[in-house]
Image (cartoon, rainbow, N blue to C red):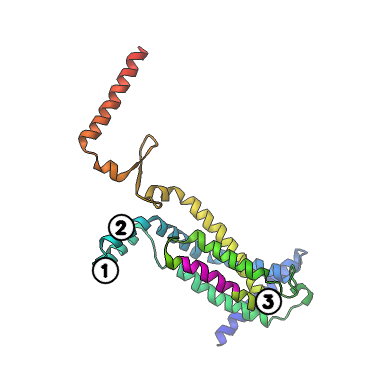
């Protein structure tokens, strides 16, 4: 209990410290202080969230292979699990990578909440932020709860492994509504933190998705696997593998014949 109280006290001191920074910048406000704290926490958690997002993107890339294994070994669960774990290992994917950042976030949210409801503001007038009279109280106009639900949905939407999976579809609806309900009941400062953190996560996820877009295209995340040829055209790997050596040689021979004809015309 003493340890938990020390954590809550630490958050209170962090809020006051960041408030002093906003005061020195000529924008003294506790709402801005919470946004600044969010950036600090985001920087600290960046290695974890980055690893999580890459893992989720990797899961998207191997979905076709994963479904193939599930269909192939549906009558042999032990073999299927072994092959799936082998697939995860080959691609460096951690299926539980998304859980750790969320588990770390929960004590942060609880500590933040307790720090806010018992916080002694140096200047109470600076506890007002935008349309909210006091960030220790719930948003009276329910704007922040709506933003909390929307940003939570968007973050889940762009990081979902399989958007067609019924369980993930359900989570994409239930989780934003649950978080929005919490934001309606608890301190507005908590919702400010959550919305800001979500926006930063969305920007980071979009960057990770963009950075890994080419690898997803090659691995065939949207359908069958593809192979990129030297000429820049894309062929189905299965089609290429089904071609016999005679067909390949025939293609090569035709290409050489065409090039010889072109050289004769130039002469």
**Are dots 3 and 1 in contact, CB under 8 Å?**
no
Label 3, on which residue?
138
Write the start and end of the magenta stretch as one range: 169-180
Residue at the spot of label 2: 68
Image location of residue 213, percent across then percent down: 46, 50
The N terminus, quarter of image: bottom right
Residue 17 lies in quadrant: bottom right
Q: Is residue 135 magenta?
A: no
Bin the neighbour count of mark 2 within 10 Å (Cα to Cα): few under 14, some 14-19, many 20 and up: few
Q: Nearer the viewer, residue 19 or 55?
A: 55
Under circle 1, the secondary element is: helix
The mark nearer the N terminus, 3 or 1, is: 1
Q: Residue 165 occupies which quadrant of the picture?
A: bottom left
**Which residue is at 27% across, 31% downward?**
251
Q: Which residue is mark 1?
A: 77
Q: Residue at x 53, y 75 (%)?
A: 106
- Occupied quadrant, residue 41: bottom right
Q: Earlier in the sequence, mark 1 or mark 2?
A: 2
Specify the principal SS of the magenta part. Answer: helix
- Closest to the observer: 70 or 43? 70
The residue under the point 59% across, 84% down is 5
């Amino acid at each position: 209990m003493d340890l938990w109280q020390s954590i809550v006290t630490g958050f209170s001191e962090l809020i006051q410290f960041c408030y002093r920074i906003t005061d020195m910048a000529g924008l003294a406000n506790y709402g801005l202080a919470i946004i600044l704290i969010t950036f600090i926490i985001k920087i600290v958690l960046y290695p974890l969230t980055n690893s999580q997002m890459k893992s989720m993107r990797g899961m998207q890339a191997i979905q076709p292979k994963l479904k193939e294994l599930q269909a192939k070994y549906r009558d042999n669960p032990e073999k299927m699990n072994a092959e799936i774990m082998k697939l995860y290992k080959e691609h460096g994917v951690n299926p539980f990578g998304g859980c750790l950042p969320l588990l770390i976030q929960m004590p942060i949210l609880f500590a933040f909440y307790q720090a806010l409801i018992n916080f002694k503001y140096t200047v109470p007038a600076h506890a007002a932020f935008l349309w909210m009279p006091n960030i220790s109280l719930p948003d009276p106009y329910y704007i922040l709860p709506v933003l909390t639900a929307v940003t939570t949905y968007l973050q889940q939407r762009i990081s979902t492994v399989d958007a067609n999976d019924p369980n993930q579809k359900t989570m994409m609806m239930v989780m934003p509504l649950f978080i929005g309900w919490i934001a309606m009941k608890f301190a507005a400062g908590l919702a400010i933190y959550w919305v800001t953190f979500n926006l930063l996560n969305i920007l980071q996820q979009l960057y990770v998705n963009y950075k890994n877009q080419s690898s997803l295209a090659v691995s065939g995340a949207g359908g069958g696997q593809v192979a990129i040829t030297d000429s820049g055209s894309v062929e189905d790997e299965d089609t290429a593998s089904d071609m016999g050596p005679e067909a390949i040689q025939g293609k090569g021979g035709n290409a050489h014949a065409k090039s010889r004809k072109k050289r004769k015309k130039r002469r």
